[in-house]
Image (cartoon, rainbow, N blue to C red):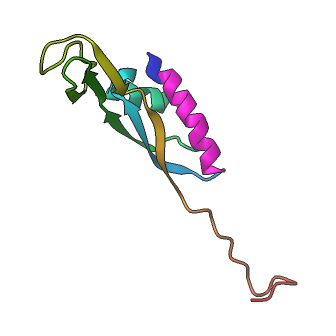
Amino acid sequence: MHELGMCEAILDTVERRAAGRRVSAFTVRVGTLHRVVEPAMDQAFALASEGTLAEGAELHLVVLPVRGTCASCGLTTESAEPPVACAGCGATDLELSGGDELILESIEVDAPLRVERSADVPGHTR
């Protein structure tokens, strides 16, 4: 299950960016060439995040397509699966682009706790 290795790497980045704050949600953009299975990714994240600041956080996964450009006719198509032949002319000489992204797009963190000081604390003025 390669999703576990991906989650561990993503979690490391999430924790560094969160800077000690509890993480409530984050969004990851992943290219279709990584062949990520969403239920497996959710399970891997739950396992990898146990005992961390991101435990229980929501993982939002955005899967990005791969683009194939035909060298014969120039047609460019996007697909959730790596294309093997041009949809226009049937040629197999395709140049693939995209679909290999792995981007931590956003992180939602809980606000840091504010400590209210009482007026009767020595040396404290409001």
Q: Closest to the observer: 25 or 98?
A: 98
Q: Which residues are magenta?
A: 4-19
In the depicted structure, whether residue 122 falls above or below residue 29: below
The total of numbered circles placed on residues is 0
Name the image quarter holding the N terminus: top left
Does the rendering let one see residue 49?
no
Quadrant in the picture for residue 11: top right
15 part of magenta stretch: yes
Expressed as whole percent of the image width and height from the top left, the position of residue 44 reads 45, 26
**24 and 84: which is toward the camera:** 84
The residue at the point 66 percent across, 50 percent down is 20
Residue at 22% in and 25% down: 74
Q: Residue 95 falls in which quadrant of the image?
A: top left
Q: Nearer the viewer, residue 89 or 13?
A: 89
Vertical comparison of 16 with 72: above or below? below
> Which of the pair 43/34 is nearer the observer?
34
Residue 23 vs residue 74: left or right? right
- Outermost residue, right direction? 123
Residue name at image x 29 percent, y 31 percent:
65
Q: Position of residue 37 (x, y in %)?
A: 33, 24
Is residue 75 shown above or below 122? above
